[in-house]
Amino acid sequence: MSERVRTLNRDGIAAFDRYLSELARNALASPPYDILDDWRHAQEFEPEIMVDQMPNGAPFRNRMEFGVYLHRKLSVVDQSAVSRNYGLWNWLSLYFFDQLCPPGADGARRVGPKELYLFLPGQGFRRHIRHLVRSPWLIVADHGDNAKVLLLGTDRGNASPLTTRGRVFEHLAVRQNVLNNRTIIAAARRLYFDERSGRTWFGASGRGAGSVGRYALVVQQLELTYDTRACTVEQLLGLLPSEFDEYKRRAGLR
Amino acid sequence: MKRRFNSTGRRHIPSSLVSIRLVYPDEAHDSVSFDAELSKLKTLGLPNNAKVYVEPYVTGSSSIMRFPFGTIDSIVVPPDRTLSELDAGGRIVFRIKVVDESETLGRILAASNAIRPLDDRVSQDQQRSILPVETRDLGEAVWRLDMQDVDRPTLVLNSRIGGLLDRIKNDPFVQGAIVPHAVRQILIAILDPERADVTDDTPWVQDWKVWIAAMLGTPLDEDLDADLVEQRADDIVNRFVERWRFASRAEPNHEHSTPYHE
């Protein structure tokens, strides 16, 4: 069922925060869904935007689908204006909470760190980017289809694909200079995303030579010497050392 | 003391060669813009045809923009310098790059990161301070030290606590409860030989070394062993608190006449 998007006010965010603390102690605690449309805790977002927890009649299949959905819904407003709208992201987090922190068969929820659900001032980039609702939206908004490499690495057989971020995301997205460089993310897609299977290559997120972790370190080094923001994907890939040859071969670059 | 060599050949652009100022719009709903004076880049002795780029970005955010400013010998200010794509409400800093584009792949000849713009809404004292103080909504935290992607470490106070900014300037009790701990964090970052993000090339480090030398009455010791970092930081903080006598000045009958900023 569709619902109009709102923003949690300070009391609403505090209530959600208290719930997350309670959930860490009592895994059976019920989310305070009643505050979503309670005027004391939430105000209507302008302009009117309607969202649905299951727009296709089923939970989101992966974080890419979720990010594309949010981006489409929020495209009527300026990205820079909503990016730090704390009340909006926290309202959406509570609204989608059953998919972000689903109850198990026994009703118990395995809650993660608060920054996965709560977007707050002063958290810093590394915690902000872990927010399970805002980050898929932001990455799709900034990188379009190339967001796949960051958002589709985690859904192998995961019944709750919105709950986790995956190691590819952790290596690339938590580095501010990497995430805001479109060339680096586009090149990462070429190297590590298997277009046929719709997933990152098996082993890409490991620690070995040519892995995503190594890629994140190497491209940051290259950025000291080369203007990687202005170069093409092919130029950037051409600068990578031989340890990346196997992934270049898979990408049809050698 | 750690020393690192810049193996890329890239030169650092001194802050004295650039001046960037935020320009606030008349209408609140319009975006902030900026002015940049870059003509002194010529004095770096770089190729005349090297391209100049200005990249404003928001600390703690992935939002970034990029403005071409012509070449070293012919700075061309783009007419539209509106920062419309940066996250609203974040702290804006700038990166400047001088790029050799004579070959197919641009090579960075000189750069400077996290340049703090002149801001008419921030006092000149704040802009000169080695530890500027800001207020932001920090949730339930009272304060924190901001050292990530900034041109200087910044003490951030929670804007939800009314009057805290005044108290950090005037109340020795609040000063003593917060400032020495912030200073200690900065000292450890400077002294720690394993800390790759704070090196002698980091612009603010030299300012802090001058301050430390003044505090100690002697230059900071070089080649400090990693095991001694915390002890050395504690020594310096002790000198700091003794000099400023926070506890004595916080006593009920003491006249709070000594300002925190000398």
Image: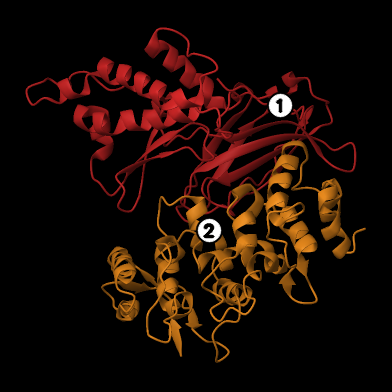
Chain colours: A orange, B red
Residue B262 appears in the figure: no
Instruction: Reply above or below: A89 against B78.
Output: below
Instruction: Reply above or below: A112 against A36.
Output: above
Q: Residue A231: x and y, percent?
A: 81, 48
Distance CA(mark 1)–CA(mark 2): 31 Å
Closest to the observer, B42 or B28: B42
Give the quarter of the figure containing the N terminus of chain B.
top right
Left or right: B30 as drawn, with respect to B254: right
Left or right: B162 as drawn, with respect to A74: left
Q: Does dot 1 land on a helix, a strand or a loop? A: loop
At label 1, the amino acid type is Asn
Residue underneath mark 2: A129
The residue depicted at 57 percent of the width and 35 percent of the height is: B197
Per the rendering, the mark at residue B6 is 1
Please tell me in which quadrant of the rendered image residue B35 appears: top right
Q: Does dot 2 land on a helix, a strand or a loop? A: loop
